[in-house]
Each structure stands twice: as C-alpha cells, then as structure tokens.
Amino acid sequence: MAKRYLIETFGCQMNVHDSERMAGLLEHAGYVPATEDAGPDVVVVHTCSVRERAEDKLYARLAELSAAQDDGRSKPVVAVTGCVAQQEGESLAKRHPGVDIVVGTQALKRLPDLLADVEQGVGSSQAVDINPYEDVSFPLGVVRRSDPVKAYVTVIEGCNDYCSYCVVPYTRGHERMRPLADIVAEVSHAVQGGRREVHLLGQIVNHYVAPDRPGTDFAGLLEAVHEVPGVERIRFASPHPRHVTPRMIEAMRVLPRVCRHLHLPLQSGSNRVLARMRRRHTREQYLDLVDALRAAMPSIALSTDMIVGFPGESAEDFEDSLSLVRRVRYTSMFSFKYSPRPHTLAAKRLPDDVPEPEKTRRIIVLQDTQKDIQLTLHQAVIGSTVSVLADSVSRRRADELAGRTGSNVVVNFPGPPDWIGRFIDVRVERAGPNSLSGRPVSVEGVPLRTGDTRLHSGAAGR
Ligand code: SAH
Ligand code: SF4
Ligand code: F3S
C-alpha cells in the first residue's frame, strides 16, 4: 500500500510554496496524501524561524507528536524541514530523538532520498542534510499546487541584506536568482493548469536580475511574465523600498495585469531605528517613494510590515512609526513585537531593552491606529463595484465565497463554489476593518439577472 504523507507548514509564502514542492516530490516518489481516517506514515513539519514564537511552534508540535506516540499509536517518520531545520541542524536531531530527518532550506529536493534511507535503515537512525546547495532549479511540473486559483513561483532564493534583526539570510542562504526561462516556463505551466493569478516570490523580489538574459531586471521580469498567455493577475512579495526603481514603477503603471498593490515593508518610521535596523533608507526617502508611486498610480494600495520594540526604540521613535502609518494610510499591515534571533547583529550587539509590557502596549496602539485607517478606507468603497477573483468558500458562511480585489482587499459575497476561479463584479454593501462584503452583479463580465439572488451557477458562463 502506498505510504501516506502529511506536511504541516509554518511561516511565509515561500514556505507554503516549498511545501507544494515537497508534496510534489513525495508524490513522485510514490507517497499519497494522508486522509482523516488513514493517518500519515510520514509527517513533515516545515518550519519558520523569523520570530521566537514561530520557532516555538515547532517544539510544541514535536511535543504533541511524541505524546501521541506515548499513547501507543504507531510512530510516523518525522521530518523537520525549512528555516529552523537549517538553523539548528544536528543539534535539533540530538535534542529530539523522535525526529528522524532534518532537512535544511537548500536541501529540500533530497527529502525523498533521505526518507528512503531512513525507511531502509541505511546509515544512522537520524538523517541530517543542511548543506548549502547552490542549485535553484526545480523540475517543471512536479510541484503539487495547493491553491486552485493562484500560483506561487519563486524568482529569488535567499537574501544578502542582513537587516540587523532578521534571521532569513542565515536560514535561507545568500541570494540566488532563478533563470528567467525557468520562471516563464513555470508560469506557463501553472496557467495551463488553470491558475489565473501568479505570485512571484523572493525575499527581496525586486532585486531580480536574470542570470540568463543580460539587462533583464525586475521590471523586465514583470514584462516577461505579463506576456505569458493566460496570466490575468500578477502579484509579488516582498519588494524592498530601496530597490523600487523608476523602471519598476513604470512597468507596474503600464502593465494592466500587474495588480495595483504594493507590499512595501517599512519596519519603523524613525530614522534612528531604521539605521540600527540596517534598512538603508530613511523615513524621508520612503515617503518620497510613496509619493512617486501614487503620482504614477493614484489608485495603488500599499501595505506594510512593522516591528515594535526594536532595541533602543524610544516612545518618540514609536510616535514616528505611528505618524508615518497615519500619513501613508496602508490598506493592510503585519505588525510584530521584536524578538532577538540567533546569529543576527541585533541579537549580538543590541540589548532587547524595551520591556515586554511596553512592546504589547505599542503593538496595540499601532494595530488600533491601523484598524481605524482600514475601516475608513473600506467604508469609502461602499456603493461601488469591485472586480474580485473568487478564490475560496468564505470562512464566515458555507454559502458565501471569498476573493480579493486587485488591491488585495478580501471581499465576501453569496455564490456557489463553482464560481471559484472566476472574476466576479461585486457591488460593495458593507465594510469592516478586514474585509468588504456585497452582492455579485456579474460573472466573468456576464451580468446576473436582477432578482437572481439564488445565484445558480448556470446564470453566467465562464
Ligand atoms: N523579506 C521580506 C520579509 C522578511 S520576514 C522583507 O524583507 O520584507 C517578514 C517580516 O517579519 C519582516 O518584514 C519583519 O517585519 C518581521 N521580522 C523579521 N525579523 C523579526 C524579528 N527578529 N522580530 C520581529 N519581527 C521580525
Ligand atoms: Fe530579512 Fe532584511 Fe532580507 Fe527581508 S531584506 S529577508 S528583512 S534581511
Ligand atoms: Fe520564516 Fe523562513 Fe519564511 S524564517 S518567514 S519561513 S524565510
């Protein structure tokens, strides 16, 4: 009988996509996904190390897995992969005897081989591979995409920026570009498989330079992906403000399938803190960039990442973050309390001196400020019609769908599951801080009949 696998994923989109790749590799090696009734023979825990709490999730999960074993259930093979695996290597295996395999971020392709070794009892009982393989190729068509609508496509692996708080350069290794030809082939393949939205991924995605086509930068990459027949939306994450060039802004402006949304991590609005974070731009440069983007694309939505309680962040520094957030008016934000990470410059040199209760106070103030901004921005949309790519059944109600606008706002609306993957025009009726909701008015441009609120899927063709 075929062996069953389960992959549990923590962390960023890059990790979600790595899991799709590992799932594909395992299925090529003959494994099948585990089901509710048939438990897994192999559990892969794909880890994140970006904050202490992310790393802790691994240890909590390992404790659960060994508790299940103590209950007498049969023990699956346990593989720990990804950023914590890379960071901890051998020591993770030593500290956790229940872990059979440790695979670093650059060795993921070796997972099936290591599994075979462990299952056949080759070598020691634990297998560890955290070697820095340079190779960024991945066989075309092997990935097992988990989303029916969106396709993640890696364009850059690793990062050379060494922001002082960030563990990623240590867990993901140095920056390596994928050939443009491979990216375009993968995008074409994904589109042929029915995906309509492409997400280009890299730690500093806009640092892209094609190794196989001289003169092609990130703007050129956007152009090349835009030309692939069938691509209807292009998104990318994450760009670094420092590498947003006039060419990139112009490409976004003229290419209609590139979404009018830019995730532009800020981290702090204080120049003093930005310098200590080694972000290599100032508050003023960031604001000039926001102005340039809005001059080129007045409707562009901006989102960001923020850190509160970075070492030495004073009440005044935090006020600078707040004032910048109020000024830019982001459509969404991820905010985090600083936590020291292994190997990083900040952890080595800067004492984690903002007390925990103060970090909590600041993050609450920041999130409340952001919530008010989002609510105001969303309320302004009530009464207008937005184009939504339906991507899932709504989390709120089974007879509703959810999707996103080009500017990345979540919209809920009544509709049947077979609208997933279609563009729906939705008239917005209600707005909350995190989403909009409304009535569908057309499906793929075909108007729905008035009164057709039961919304039979036959009401409009594809
Ligand atoms: N490569 C991306 C994202 C990196 S990690 C970029 O450069 O934008 C995602 C986010 O986690 C960061 O933007 C930052 O806000 C947060 N983060 C990273 N390290 C952190 C730390 N040590 N403590 C708290 N938040 C952190
Ligand atoms: Fe981390 Fe900075 Fe690289 Fe982003 S740019 S991954 S925050 S080091
Ligand atoms: Fe986490 Fe690694 Fe991504 S540390 S955020 S999974 S690159």
Image (cartoon, rainbow, N blue to C red):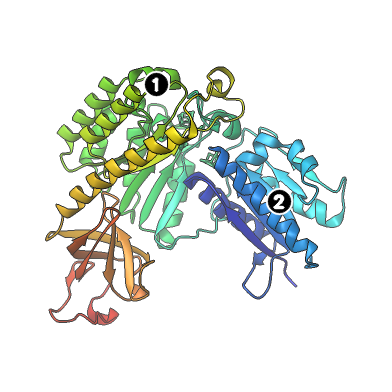
Residue at label 2? 79
Q: Earlier in the sequence, mark 1 or mark 2?
A: 2
Q: Give the vertical position of 30 relative to 157 (above or below).
A: below
Quarter of the figure that contains the C terminus: bottom left
Does the CB distance between marks 1 and 2 fall below 8 Å? no
The spot of residue 310 in percent (x, y) is: 45, 27
- Describe residue 405's horizontal placement relative to residue 281 as left or right: left
Q: Could you say which is closer to the camera, residue 363 or residue 225?
A: 363
Q: Is 199 placed left or right of 261 in the picture?
A: right
| Residue 276: % across, % down | 44, 18
Q: Nearer the viewer, mark 1 or mark 2?
A: 1
Residue 278: x, y in percent?
44, 20
Q: Amino acid at mark 1?
A: Val
User: In this figure, which residue is indicated by the disc labeled 1?
Assistant: 273
Measuring 78% from the left and 41% from the top, which residue is drawn there?
Answer: 95
The image quadrant that residue 248 belongs to is: top left
Q: State which quarter of the image contains the N terminus.
A: bottom right
Out of 180 and 106, give the one closest to the viewer.
106
Can you give x and y, in whole percent of width and height, for residue 24 in the image? Answer: 60, 57
